Image (spheres, rainbow, N blue to C red):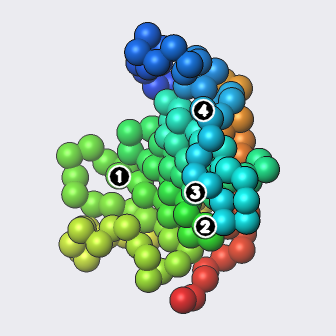
C-alpha cells in the first residue's frame, strides 16, 4: 500500500508577510527562530502547508504533519501519535500512540475507536512527498525512530 502526501493550497502568507518565502511554505527551509532552549540557543520554527513544529540541529522536537485531510501525525518529545479518520462521514477513528496513556482520541466513543494496524502505520511513515520537503524528511526520520523504539510505558 502506497500513500502519497497530498498537495495543499498555495502560500496564503506571501503577500501579507514580506519576509515569509514560498520555500518556507513548501517545507524547504525553516521559517525563523522558534522558542528559546533551556540549554541556550533557539529552535528552528517550521510553518509549512503540511503543518509546523520546531527542530534543533535537524532533529524534530515537536510538530504535526498532515499527510492528507484524514491522516495526521503528531510528535512531542518522545511521543508519537498517528490519527487516521479513514472514512468520510463516519465517527470511527484509528490511532497509534507509543504512549498509551496519552492517546488523542479521548473524545471518540470506545465502540468507534480502533487501534491502527501495523501495515497502515508503515505505509503512513513511508509516504512519499511529491516535492522536495526538508520538513517531511526530518519529520519522517523522527517518526520512524519513535515507532521503531516501540511502546513507552509511563
Instruction: Choose mark 1 or mark 2, whichever is in front.
Output: 2
Q: Residue furthest bottom?
A: 154
Which quadrant does the N terminus fall into? top right
Instruction: Choose mark 4 or mark 2, whichever is in front.
Output: 4
Q: Residues within 10 Å of mark 2 (few under 14, many from 20)?
A: few
Q: Give the residue number, with chain letter if any, for mark 4.
A: 31
Mark 1 near mark 4, Cβ–Cβ under 8 Å?
no
Q: Position of residue 81 (x, y in %)?
A: 50, 64
Secondary element at tag 4: loop
- At 61% from the left edge and 80% from the top edge, which residue is drawn? 151
- In the rendered image, the vertical position of residue 116 relative to residue 9, given as above or below: below
Secondary element at tag 1: loop
Compute the Cα span from label 2 to label 3.
6 Å
Q: Residues within 10 Å of mark 1 (few under 14, many from 20)?
A: some
Q: Give the residue number, with chain letter if any, for mark 3.
A: 62
Q: Position of residue 77 (x, y in %)?
A: 61, 67
Q: Residue furthest front?
A: 40
Q: Which mark is residue 16?
A: none
Q: Give the residue number, with chain letter if any, for mark 1.
A: 85
* Observer-nearest of 40 and 9: 40
Mark 2 near mark 3, Cβ–Cβ under 8 Å?
yes
Which quadrant does the C terminus fall into? bottom right
Q: Is residue 128 visible?
A: no
Instruction: Choose mark 3 or mark 4, whichever is in front.
Output: 4
Mark 3 near mark 1, Cβ–Cβ under 8 Å?
no
Secondary element at tag 3: strand
Q: Position of residue 9 (x, y in %)?
A: 43, 20
Compute the Cα span from label 4 to label 2.
20 Å
- At 56% from the left edge and 69% from the top edge, which residue is drawn? 79
Question: Which one is earlier in the sequence, the residue at label 1 or at label 2?
Answer: 2
Question: Which one is earlier in the sequence, the residue at label 3 or at label 1?
Answer: 3
Q: Give the residue number, with chain letter if any, for mark 2.
A: 77
Amino acid at each position: 500500500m502506497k500513500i502519497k502526501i497530498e498537495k495543499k493550497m498555495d502560500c496564503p502568507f506571501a503577500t501579507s508577510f514580506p519576509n515569509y518565502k514560498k520555500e518556507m511554505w513548501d517545507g524547504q527551509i525553516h521559517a525563523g527562530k522558534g522558542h528559546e532552549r533551556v540549554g541556550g540557543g533557539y529552535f528552528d520554527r517550521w510553518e509549512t502547508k503540511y503543518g509546523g513544529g520546531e527542530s534543533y540541529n535537524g532533529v524534530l522536537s515537536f510538530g504535526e504533519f498532515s499527510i492528507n485531510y484524514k491522516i495526521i501525525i503528531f510528535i512531542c518529545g518522545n511521543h508519537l501519535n498517528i490519527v487516521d479518520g479513514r472514512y468520510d462521514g463516519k465517527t470511527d477513528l484509528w490511532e497509534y500512540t507509543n504512549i498509551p496513556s496519552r492517546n488523542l482520541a479521548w473524545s471518540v466513543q470506545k465502540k468507534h475507536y480502533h487501534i491502527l494496524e501495523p501495515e497502515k502505520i508503515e505505509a503512513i511513515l513511508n509516504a512519499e512527498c511529491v516535492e522536495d520537503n526538508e520538513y517531511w524528511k526530518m519529520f519522517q526520520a523522527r517518526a520512524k525512530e519513535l515507532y521503531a523504539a516501540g511502546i513507552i510505558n509511563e
